[in-house]
Amino acid sequence: MSLNTNSWNRLRYTLYLPIYDLIADKIFRKYRKRSVELLNAKPDDTILILGAGTGLDLPYLQGYPNLTAIDITPGMISKLKQRAEKLGIPVQAHVMNGQQLDFAAYSFDAVIAHLILAVIPDPIACIKEVERVLKPEGTVMVFDKFLPEGQQPSILRRFFNIIASALFSDINRSIETIVGHTSLSIELNEPAAFNGTFRLVRLRKLKP
Ligand SMILES: C[S@@+](CC[C@H](N)C(=O)[O-])C[C@H]1O[C@@H](n2cnc3c(N)ncnc32)[C@H](O)[C@@H]1O
């Protein structure tokens, strides 16, 4: 049985809200900026920010007027809306489950998935939804911590992950395995924070 459920995440992220930006802003700034550069979106592209949190990616998305943000935690979405207003950035923001998106197929040119695939209870359901809502040739930027390719977690690491996945995020996920459940292709996988424990990964939806 896993402690990592949507209800638990909604509760814990509501509790983390007052200190979230202190932890996730400064240390990840340069990777958020790099990720948006690698996304290489056109100004009129429709962009979905999945599991958007308090909107720490928004400062790097000025000049993109077709932004949509979703998150399962209502408090996160409220804070994101305040940030968007302060920055003068138009964002359609919704409380929504990233494993079951309430958008039609082919709705977005690009998806930003920062610090969500290692948090969400079912990353495979999530990436399949990303694939569904993405237009052909659409791009996804993932920023998160993943196991090195081909590495299996040790028993100790599996044990520690019971606590890590409930309080922080899963430390035993493989981006290759997650993406392998879709027909998205991994175009780029570059080391990011903490000596490459965190990765910046660009995915592409190929033409059918
Ligand atoms: C580590 S935070 C990352 C937030 C933001 N992407 C960032 O980079 O700062 C994880 C976020 O995922 C959200 N989340 C967890 N499960 C989710 C789900 N099933 N659907 C949508 N969002 C979810 C949480 O509410 C939280 O805001």
Image (cartoon, grey):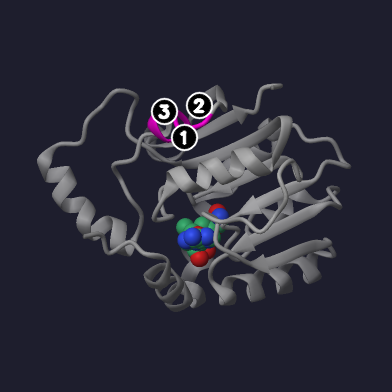
Q: Is residue 160 left or right of residue 108?
A: left
Lower sequence index among marks 1 and 2: 2
| Label 1 within 8 A of ligand 1 by Cβ | no
The answer to the question of whether label 1 and label 2 lie on touching residues, with beta carbons closer than 8 A, is yes
Disc number at residue 176? 3
Residue neighbourhood size for the residue with mark 2, other residues' Cα within 10 Å, grouped as few (<14), some (14–19), many (≥20): few
Q: Residue 2 location, x and y as percent?
A: 25, 59
Q: Residue 197 location, x and y as percent?
A: 37, 36
Q: Secondary structure at mark 3?
A: helix
Name the residue beneath numbered marker 2: 190
Specify start and end residues of the magenta stretch as a single range.
Answer: 177-182
What is the spatial separation of the Cα atoms under label 1 and label 2, in whole angstroms? 6 Å
Q: Looking at numbered disc 1 in the image, what kind of residue is underneath it?
A: Arg
**Residue 201, placed above or below residue 68:** above
What is the spatial separation of the Cα atoms under label 3 and label 2, in whole angstroms? 13 Å
Q: Looking at numbered disc 3 in the image, what kind of residue is underneath it?
A: Glu
Q: Is residue 80 left or right of residue 6?
A: right
Q: Secondary structure at mark 2?
A: strand
At x 74%, y 56%, the residue is 68
Name the residue beneath numbered marker 1: 199
**Residue 73, placed above or below residue 154:** below
Is 132 included in the stretch rendered in magenta? no
- Let me know if residue 30 appears in the view: no
